[in-house]
Amino acid sequence: MDVGSLVRRDAVHRDIYTDPKIFDLEMERIFNTTWVYLAHASEITQEGDYKTTMLGRHPVIVSRLSDGSITALINRCRHRGPTLCQHDTGNSKFFRCPYHAWTYDNSGKLIGVPLPQGYGSDFKKEDYGLAKVPRVAIYQDFIFGSMSLEGPSLEDHLGGVKRYLDAYCAVSPTGKIDVFKGMQKCAYNGNWKYQLENGVDPYHVGALHQSSVTPEAMKIYRQGRGNVIAMDGHGVTDHTDWGPMPVDAGLSGGFNLVIFPNLIVLRSQIRTIRPIAADRTEIYTNVVKLQGIDEEINIRRMRDQEFEFGAAGTFYTDDIEIFERTQHGLKSEAVDWIVFARGLEREEMRNGYMAGAMSDETQHRGMYQRWKELMTCEPAQMIAAE
Amino acid sequence: MNPDQEKIEQFMYREARLLDKQMFEPWLDLFSEDAIYWVPAGHDDIDPREHVSVIYDDKEAMTRRVKRLRSGYAYAQEPASRVHRLVSNVEIGQLSADGQELEVSTMMLLVELSRHRQLVHSARCEFKLQPNGEDWKIKRKKINLLCNNEPLESTPFLL
């Protein structure tokens, strides 16, 4: 399979959304290599706090240890394989598999095995600690993990997007953000990359969201001099020409970020993409709470988020509708190519990055170039165990 | 006004029927001006000021939701879902001391057909009702979805 040929400069082949073999390769070459967003540090503030999530196909427990550091363990007993922890969040310094009572501390060390003499004299508990996500790194309290022992640092991976994450947190008077409790969880019958494209797609807002978007907000998209930017493999729509990221998280100024491959940051949300299959995706969203501002403003931000996004959101249900219609449409072999050609003629290098006009598809082309680079690269060696 | 089991049940069936038949405007009229329409996320008993919900609408937001559905551009409801609601297990609590609030809980089984796919949504609904002459107004409708901690399929219709 020549995966590279599926991404052209101005179009991508429908197989990348529909072929289960491509999906398997994405799990291996993208999600098992690059930096994947796992959690926000404000979800696990206390010693022993944990959050479970998915890193590609790996169930993961992200824990805060007694020294304050953060570790990410594969949520799979080293004995026979069941997941150890069943909760979204909680606090525990130990994880015990109920099957045969193998017990681990939250750094992954195996500390208890019933009747260990049955394994013979060579058995060492040190050899059976929980597998770890080999690299965990944090930027502005956003916690990422990489299944690859080697590769670019998180900061190199984020590249120019760091500046936007800085600006996102700087909206808070303390320079730090928290998240509200709980998550909005949604699922759709469609490929994960529709969500990646849609998170930075100003072109669709005036059309698909006609029933929800206000005329004032539409001006940003139709009259603004903002940019869409292909930034180190990530996608940015920058409408700060209309104003900085607003404290009320309304549709006035600011920017949208899609941090390849699974994180979307926009308005008051941290949205995470969980690919399940070529035609199935789950979306988990945290709502951001700004530190140091009036509680009522934070509550208003959450109420707006609930009205517009999540499984019943006035914007988001129309997005999901399109994701599912697209999966249906792409089953047809009559047309192979999906067009990403807007702005090819007018995009230009600005501040070191290719940038297009507000309705262009420069940012999508950038993300598909990153996709192609990773998909045509032999995967780095994954670590097997502790 | 004494809460009468049969009258309350009829009120609950009417609320369900108005939604099933997409009679959204008379449905909105069932709610008081300070009403809350609430679908918790994660679990049933969350603090909506500390924890995100699926829906937490006041009357103004409910009205905007209906307006969108009527706009002709709500593509997630083009065509509209067909829905059947079965409402049962209607349990009536005590009328508050001032006679202004009555708690009623029901079970709802909602069967939805959209995009050629039939889905079942199960919920326990907790209502707060307010006397309104011979009738009632809904002060709060809280929908505790069985699946409220699962990734939900798109829910663009009114629950």
Image (tube, helix red, strand yellow):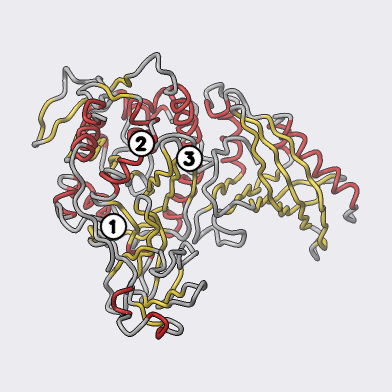
To which quarter of the image does residue A145 belong?
A: bottom left
- Whether residue A85 is situated above or below residue A103 in the rendered picture: above
Task: Give the percent coordinates (x, y) of residue A24.
Answer: 35, 41
Residue A19: horizontal and vertical position, in percent? 38, 31
**Chain holding disc 2:** A
- Label 3's element? helix
Left or right placement of residue A186 versus residue A57 in this view: right
**Residue A378, quarter of picture:** top left
Image quarter of residue A129: bottom left
Residue B133 disc label: none
- Give how far across and how far down residue A37 sits, in percent: 31, 53
Query: Can you identify the residue that label 2 sits on?
Result: A21
Q: Earlier in the sequence, mark 1 or mark 2?
A: 2
Rendered position, A256 above or below B48: above
Callout 3: chain: A
> Where's the C terminus of chain A, which quadrant?
bottom left
Give the labeled residue for mark 3.
Answer: A308
Q: Residue at label 1? A: A142
What is the CA distance from the residue labelled 1 to the residue labelled 2?
A: 31 Å
Secondary-structure class at tag 2 = helix
